């Protein structure tokens, strides 16, 4: 009887120690544009699964599978690169717009992850024009910074 309890205890102890801690997934900041859509490029690390990656990026698993045709979800390998769709930016809310006296510009407070490219698409203003009105933004945007975006009527595009 003692041997029986010893064996049961040993098996339970082995099973508890066999569980590995979850693998930490560091979200990529590298983005690409492919077929007109923006994607993160994620390099799969040891122990990561497509499911765990979908949870880390908060992107539904079917969206990742659709963005990576030919992927075998059950057999991903370390070093394999996945395209993770970037969620689209929400529409402009009134709280983001600070009216000016001359009404020619919108002042936008930069949120984490926003780029000149994403803002140019959001406000439908070419990136070059945003750069012209905001010197120093060529090297990137800082979260919390306020940038000046001309309204459509205040600029003419020279092609």
Image (cartoon, rainbow, N blue to C red):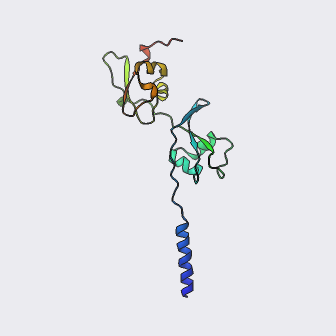
Compare residues 51 and 90 and report the one nearer the observer: 51
The residue that appears at 55% across and 47% down in the rendered structure is 54
Q: Position of residue 109 (x, y in %)?
A: 37, 30
The quadrant holding residue 2 is bottom right
The answer to whether any part of residue 62 appears in the image is yes
Q: Quadrant of the C terminus?
A: top right
The answer to whether any part of residue 126 appears in the image is no
The residue that appears at 62% across and 30% down in the rendered structure is 35
Left or right: where does residue 125 sit relative to residue 41? left
The quadrant holding residue 140 is top left
Residue 84 sits above or below residue 106 on the image: below
Q: Position of residue 40 (x, y in %)?
A: 55, 38
Residue extending farthest to the bottom is 1
Residue extending farthest to the left is 101
Compare residues 29 and 86 and report the one nearer the observer: 29
Residue 155 sits above or below residue 79 on the image: above
Residue 34 sits above or below residue 2 on the image: above
The residue that appears at 58% across and 49% down in the rendered structure is 45
Q: Quadrant of the N terminus?
A: bottom right
Compare residues 31 and 149 and report the one nearer the observer: 31
The quadrant holding residue 137 is top left
Left or right: where does residue 77 sit relative to residue 88? right
Q: Position of residue 139 (x, y in %)?
A: 45, 28
Residue 23 sits above or below residue 158 on the image: below
Q: Position of residue 99 (x, y in %)?
A: 33, 22
The residue that appears at 66% across and 52% down in the rendered structure is 75
Left or right: where does residue 36 sit relative to residue 148? right
Left or right: where does residue 145 sit relative to residue 49? left
Number of dots carrying numbers = 0
């Amino acid at each position: 009887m003692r041997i029986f309890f010893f064996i049961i205890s040993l098996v339970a102890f082995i099973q508890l120690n066999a569980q590995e801690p979850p693998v930490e997934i560091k979200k990529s900041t590298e983005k690409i544009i492919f077929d007109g859509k923006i994607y993160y490029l994620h390099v799969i690390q040891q122990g990561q699964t497509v499911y765990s990656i979908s949870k880390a990026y908060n992107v539904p698993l079917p969206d990742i599978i659709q963005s990576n045709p030919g992927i075998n979800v059950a057999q991903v390998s370390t070093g394999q690169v996945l395209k993770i769709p970037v969620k689209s930016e929400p529409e402009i809310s009134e709280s983001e717009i600070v009216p000016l006296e001359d009404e020619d510009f919108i002042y936008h407070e930069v949120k984490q992850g926003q780029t000149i490219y994403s803002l140019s698409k959001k406000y439908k203003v070419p990136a070059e024009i945003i750069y012209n009105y905001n010197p120093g933004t060529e090297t990137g945007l800082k979260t919390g910074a306020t940038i000046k975006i001309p309204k459509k009527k205040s600029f003419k595009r020279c092609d």
